Image: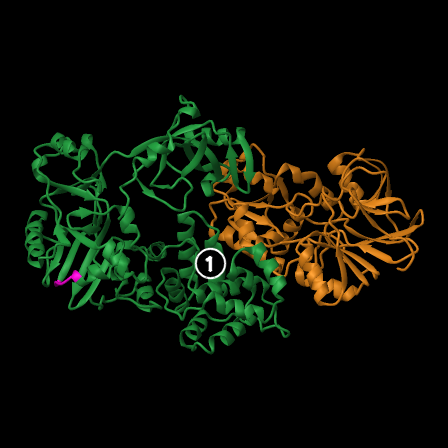
Chain colours: A green, B orange
Amino acid sequence: MRDFAALLERLAFTPQRNAKLRLLAQYFAAVPDPERGLALAALTGDLKLRAVTPSLLRGLVAERVDPELFAISYDFVGDLAETIALIWPDPETPPNDTDLPLPQLVAELQTTGKAGLPGLIAARLDALNPSERYAYLKLATGAMRVGVSARLARAALAEYGGLQLIEIEEIWHGLTPPYLDLFAWVEGGARPEAAALAPFRPVMLSTATDLDALRPLDPADYVAEWKWDGIRVQAVSDQGRRRLYSRTGEDIGAAFPDLLDRLDFEGVIDGELLVRRGDAVGTFGELQQRLNRKTVSKKLLETHPAGLRAYDLLIWQGEDLRALPFAERRARLEAAIASLGDPQIDTSALLDFGDWDGLAALRAAPPDPVIEGVMIKRRDSPYLAGRMKGPWFKWKRDPLVIDAVLLYAQRGHGKRSGYYSDFTFGVWDGNELVPVGKAYFGFTDEELRALDRFVRGNTIERFGPVRAVKPVKVVEVAFEGLNRSGRHKSGVAMRFPRISRIRDDKPAAEADRIETLRALLPAEAP
Amino acid sequence: MGATRAPLIQRPEGLYCPGGDFHIDPTQPVDRALITHAHADHARAGHGAVLATRQTLDLMAIRYGEDFTASRQIAEGRMRIGEAEVSFHPAGHILGSAQIAVQAGGPRVTVSGDYARVANPSCAPWEPVPCDIFVTEATFGLPVFHHPDPATETQKLLASVAAFPERAHIVGAYSLGKSQRVMMLLREAGWDGPIYIHGSLERLSAYHIAEGVPLGDLRPATDNSLKKADFAGQIVIAPPSVFESTWAQRFPDPVLAFASGWMSVRARARQRGVELPLVISDHVDWADLTRTITELDPAETWVTHGREDAVIRWCELQGRAARPLHLAGYEDEAE
């Protein structure tokens, strides 16, 4: 447990992705089975434990600590599990200095009944030190919150074993904690057999392009289709087992039972998950409301029905089609989708274009607001795993831009230590500037130095690592779209914002107004 | 206590002893000041006369210049000031730190200043001073504060240096006391290479060495002959204010560590933008604070600078008389 607690503590304070990968890989190298596999499962959310509720924990601590002292402490610390981990009184007789094994702690939490749970947790809190208690409570409540996604944890394992992430994603869903066969493989043993039904297949990805890069290519060798702004998914149905995977192999099916019901076939379809009402396609914001839910309300299923727009066919009725040229797969796809006869599952239309300028014209005037550009695919390309430069291109619509005023800056980490590199910016709402987003990239190193100097010379207030700056610096912010947001005072949330230019030529008074942003919002959801 | 007048009273500038006409750790210039230790919020320049331990006087002279006070006196043995008898006793906080015992006819009062009960090789250990009124600090006066063994925190730092050998580690530490404590902990843990230090630590660290605290090979971090890459795998100690300055830009992809008792609370560590929190404190934690009150068993406990509420509540639960002193001007952030 000590190694695991130390890992969680370190990860929680480590902002850089590469440093997290290093810490995880070092942990996998240093810690034996089955502990490391359980730790991996805890981070990927695959460890199924009896859920320990906050009220159970409050009850436990109330038996040992004066309520007033607890209230003062909770107020200071601000996090329930952390307060309990820190305030839990050491037992009268100090515990032996033994390191409780993680596998034992996990097994107990899995097998202890509801009635025995409070006693078990109290006994374990007695035996652990504060840092271990915190890790234990995070484990028991299932809320790790150390800034590590399931994908990052798998990427670290790939890095540790010198494998491609895609190789691990491909077999992940057939494996179970503590992943002994997986660790054996990454350390040079045999690849585990993917025995499970409906496994994930690595997805084919595209690279970005533009008109100049397309010019040398012969348009006759390519097809084009709309790039829909939903979620790229792989819909799998295998002998009654149905799954919906994200392009990184995350199983997101639980949030889309309505679509799972419709996967009435044997095969693997690559497509775009969208909210669909007849021919109308819902915005990404509407689709987002359906994401990350354990259960979906009946009402939401009615107002936000899920659908699939198919791009490609990997496997059909037991036949693997991935080695066939795109054009052949496409013909098979059209026939397959037609055979389903389901209005919520259709085929992405191919675009009629003669040359690249013609495609550019189509891209400039898409027929639906939920289109975010065009996809360009070589007619003769097989379906290949990963993102290689060439057979598939994405040509996204031009980003939206606004001119905004810098309001706050926060210090960066690692190579950006000592620099103010995370910026919050705002636009005018009446005579007031309201924050509309945050960006921490898009600028060059030289621009970063200039922004850092600006922040230091124009600070008007400090809050911890954050500085408020004099609202005089205008920056051009590029972004991919705008959603409504109840969480932001401005009522809008930007997608993928970055600082594309510093507008030293523009006075703050001429920055954009909130009305400009509101006009870009998609129509209100029904 | 009966009819005798209060041995110490609260004034805007700090605790005042009417019997001896002096202040203890006043936050504004006064005629006569008794100083517990040389941290800036307790020891200020500009008093008429200062009575403190020799080391505290030396440290004040280093920080403020030789003219920091009109006259100074080294505290030794029992001393008489007006009607008051005073004596200084080790507090275990930093080099030269003392508790001050005061008696002016009535009850015996011990003013702890800042104090710690864990071993600190850079100063004399805290000693119990029997008293009727104990004036305790409450910097970490909440039951959530539990300072772990500083040796395990030091191991965290060394493990990080091993895990990221291409990066520099900058340890933010208060320039007087905490910095030298971290140096000693590193030496005890077997780190015998150079430790690079910020300019503000140079004279204070040299004074520790002259006083017999072996800090080992200290080198200026701002040596211009050193390139960025030379700091890979090295440890740099600097006051935490450098996190916000451009100073940190000279080091390769630095890991920012911070040695402070506050680091046990995650929100505090995040607030400072720290990547490697090290819970190393020169103050009593909750267990040591409450243990000290139990052991001294004073008739009354006065609680000052910090989280008075929780300590007062604890005293109440224990059936002990206690009251808060709301003294302004002491900072707990610097710890």
**Closer to the camera in the image, B254 or B333:** B333
Judged left or right of residue B168, residue B318 is: right
Q: Nearer the viewer, residue A350 or A187?
A: A350
Residue B67 against residue B178 in the figure, above or below: above
Q: Quadrant of residue A31?
A: bottom left
| Residue A245, quarter of the rendered image | bottom left
The reply to whether residue B125 is visible in this rendering is no
Q: Chain of mark 1?
A: A
Magenta span: chief secondary structure: loop
Q: How many marks?
A: 1
**Left or right: B68 as drawn, with respect to A125:** right
Give the x, y percent position of residue A454: 49, 29
Residue B48 to residue A275: above or below: above
Give the residue displayed 90% in from the left and 47% down from the top. B20
Residue at position x 77%, y 34% in the image: B65
Range shown magenta: A262-266
Q: Quadrant of residue B46?
A: top right
For the residue pair B187 and A295, the one nearer the viewer reads as A295
Amino acid carrying label 1: it is Leu
Is any part of residue A30 visible from this angle?
A: yes
Q: Which one is in front, B212 or B75?
A: B75
The verdict on residue B134 being magenta is: no
Provide residue A514's location: percent of width, then percent of height: 37, 33
**Mark 1, other Cα within 10 Å: few <14 / some 14–19 / many ≥20:** many
Query: Residue A351, position in %: x, y?
Result: 10, 40
Residue that numbered label 1 is attached to: A8
